[in-house]
Each structure stands twice: as C-alpha cells, then as structure tokens.
Image (cartoon, grey):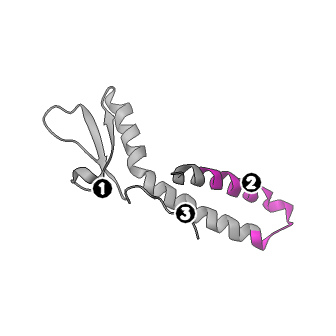
C-alpha cells in the first residue's frame, strides 16, 4: 500500500486578510485549522511565486505519484530494454522525491 500525504488535503489556495497585507496565507478553506503556510511579503512578485508553488504542492505530489505509477508500469513492460533505461532512472528519482514529501 502506498504511503499517503499526512498533511492538510488539497487543493490549497492563496488568501490575504486584513487591510495591511504583510503575508500571504495558503489554506484549504477559510478556517484557521486548515492554514498550511504563511508567506511573508517582502518582494511581492517573489512572495507570490513562492505562495503559488506552495499552494500547488498537493496537486504536484499527486501528479508525480501518477506519473511514477505509469513509469513503473512502462519499466515492468520493457524490462531489459536499454531504450527505457532513462525511464527507470527517472522513476527512481521521482520515488525519492515522493518519499521526501511523505516523510513524517
């Protein structure tokens, strides 16, 4: 059985609160218990780019897991075929990233 993400389930979105925007808030919905990150606004474009990446994390993880399932199936189908060696290498690299994201 595959390990599951233990954090707040996605999708996440970026929100701002109050009149003085000093931080961007990444959350599932407008409940304090679903807040996943705060990004301090220093340079607005950089802060917004960071917030967008954080907000996309659950969907990126899911896409990486699905891609890795496809790579594993492809590798199993073409075992021993050197033309598919890069797929096996990418599968291994993806697996390490998935494990890093799911460590807990």
Q: Secondary structure at mark 1?
A: loop
Contact between marks 1 and 2 (CB within 8 A): the answer is no
Q: Is residue 45 left or right of residue 16?
A: right
Q: What residue sits 30% from the left and 30% below the top?
A: 41
Is the residue marked by circle 1 packed among few (<14), some (14-19), or many (20+) residues within 10 Å? many
Q: Earlier in the sequence, mark 1 or mark 2?
A: 1
Residue corresponding to mark 3? 3
Residue 18: quarter of image: top left
Please name the residue shown 64% across and 51% down the image. Answer: 96
Asked which quadrant contains residue 6, the reply is bottom left
Mark 3 closeness class: few <14, some 14–19, many ≥20 residues within 10 Å: few
Residue found farthest to the left? 19
Q: Is residue 80 above or below residue 42?
A: below
Q: Which residue is mark 1?
A: 28
Rendering coords of residue 77 (x, y %): 77, 73
Give the residue number, with chain letter if any, for mark 2: 89
Q: Is residue 89 magenta?
A: yes
Magenta span: 76-97
Is disc 3 placed on a helix, strand or loop?
Answer: loop
């Amino acid at each position: 059985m595959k390990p599951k993400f233990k954090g707040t389930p996605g999708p996440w979105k970026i929100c701002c609160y109050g009149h003085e925007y000093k931080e961007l808030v990444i959350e599932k919905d407008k409940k304090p218990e679903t807040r996943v990150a705060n990004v301090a606004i220093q340079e607005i474009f950089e802060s917004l780019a960071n917030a967008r990446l954080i907000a996309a994390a659950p969907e990126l993880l899911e896409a990486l897991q699905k891609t890795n399932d496809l790579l594993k199936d492809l590798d199993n189908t073409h075992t021993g075929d050197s033309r598919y060696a890069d797929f096996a290498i990418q599968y291994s690299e993806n697996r390490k990233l998935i494990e890093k994201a799911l460590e807990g």
